[in-house]
Image: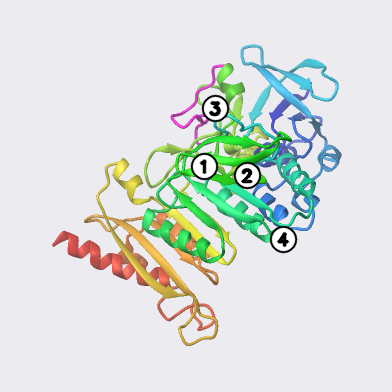
Amino acid sequence: MAAERLVVIGGDAAGMSAASQARRLKAADALEIVAFERGHFASYSACGIPYWVSGDVAARDDLIARTPEEHRERDIDLQMRTEVTELDVPGRRVKALDRESGKTYWTGYDKLVIATGARPVRPALPGMDAPGVHGVQTLDDGQALLDSLDALGAQESRRAVVVGAGYIGVEMAEAMLKRGFEVTVLNRGEQPMATLDPDMGRLVHDAMDGLGITTVNGAAVTRILTGPDGRVSEVATDAGTYPADVVVLGIGVEPETELARGAGLPVGPHGGLLTDLSMRVVGHENIWAGGDCVEVLDLVAGRTRHIALGTHANKHGQVIGSNVGGGYGTFPGVVGTAVSKVCDLEIARTGLREKDARAVGLRYVTATIESTGRAGYYPGAKPMTVKMIAELRTGRLLGVQIVGRDGAAKRVDVAAVALTAGMTVERMTALDLGYAPPFSPVWDPVLVAARKTVTAVRGAGS
């Protein structure tokens, strides 16, 4: 009996996790696995690129979890620098382009995994393609940025402009600061970190200013200006012009679904592929999708959303690989947990922001508290701000945001578990969290916020 063929489009987290899990469950004589990756690298941590650029991670290869050779040793035919350019769903085949030779060919499949990832948002503005303007989505992007920085040499004053103040924007601002650049962050929004409410984003803004990073809010980029050598020289906005030797785009990403759209596969309101709980593409028995190219269910809001995170991509891959390999797995959804940092400032969120709650018709109360990450008398205790959002009347936890130092960010995991369990803030106040003066006050900051939110819920209901 001939082996089935699994074709995987995309050689990073979701795609290769799926391929590896399927291989664990089925040997090569039962399942042939062919994977296509258009770039130079596979199975790497894109989330680590800012820390490689900053120098915190010493070498590019430190970000690579498994090389193409290692995949091939496990009977996964990973074809690098090969891009799938066309998908024939009725014919169960894909058209591949070898980017080195220019050769194209068709490959048939019995089962297909689409893991095409996401692409950086790159506005169609004059000068966006000029030398010195960089996105940072892939290892190829990171290498191109480092090569560009090396080409600048050791000039006395080096200026970096980061466009966008989300996770990638603030992380790249830190990276450029560590490399000795004068850093300006241009942000269209009211405050940096639009994944937070503006009052919490203001804390991030103040901290960035204190680190020497200039943050300009309400600044929409209109064009990139170049010098006599054709390289970027300034960034023009509707609020002014800012000199730049290098520009880093941190505007965010969008699902890379052009191939899937062209084949008529279903996409959601955010542009990502739609799947069922098994990560199977809706309406297609033999096609699965995962990673940054899909939309996922928000368990708090009850709607799909697009979240580009390696944690989700790896879980998707495990689920897909289990199902393709004859096992069983599901991905129920997410609560929207994310953490980041800029220098020693830690930023975390999970669940809904105020505007998210309003958008889905929820009425809510909020509470914000100031605390410390350790007992106040213990050396090194540093401030932390926690904001909590709960549903009016029921007290169901809806979201938590944390900005602080000294281990503040990972406290959000307590809230993520509470959200997943559907807990009320009153029930949270009784959580048996670990305590010792080096790690927490007697009342952990998350529990202090829960207590204050309980009071807000009761007050709103009276």
Packing grade of label 1 (10 A; few <14, some 14-19, many >=20) is: many
Indicate the position of residue 9 as horizontal and vertical percent values.
69, 29
Q: Nearer the viewer, mark 1 or mark 3?
A: 1
Q: Earlier in the sequence, mark 4 or mark 3?
A: 4
* Residue at (72, 44) in percent of width and height: 145
* Magenta part of the chain: 263-278
Q: Is residue 414 visible?
A: no
* Callout 4–callout 1 Cβ contact below 8 Å: no
Query: Can you tell which quarter of the image residue 234 is in?
Result: top right
Q: Which numbered marker is on residue 440? A: none
Q: Is residue 441 visible?
A: yes
Q: Earlier in the sequence, mark 2 or mark 4?
A: 4
Q: Which residue corresponds to mark 2?
A: 248
* Residue at (61, 22) in percent of width and height: 259
Q: Is residue 416 left or right of residue 318?
A: left
C-alpha distance separating marks 4 and 1: 26 Å
Q: Which residue corresponds to mark 3?
A: 281
Indicate the position of residue 443 as horizontal and vertical percent values.
40, 77
C-alpha distance separating marks 1 and 3: 17 Å
Packing grade of label 3 (10 A; few <14, some 14-19, many >=20) is: many
C-alpha distance separating marks 2 and 3: 34 Å
Q: Which residue corresponds to mark 1?
A: 307
Q: Which residue corresponds to mark 4?
A: 56
* Residue at (60, 54) in percent of width and height: 183
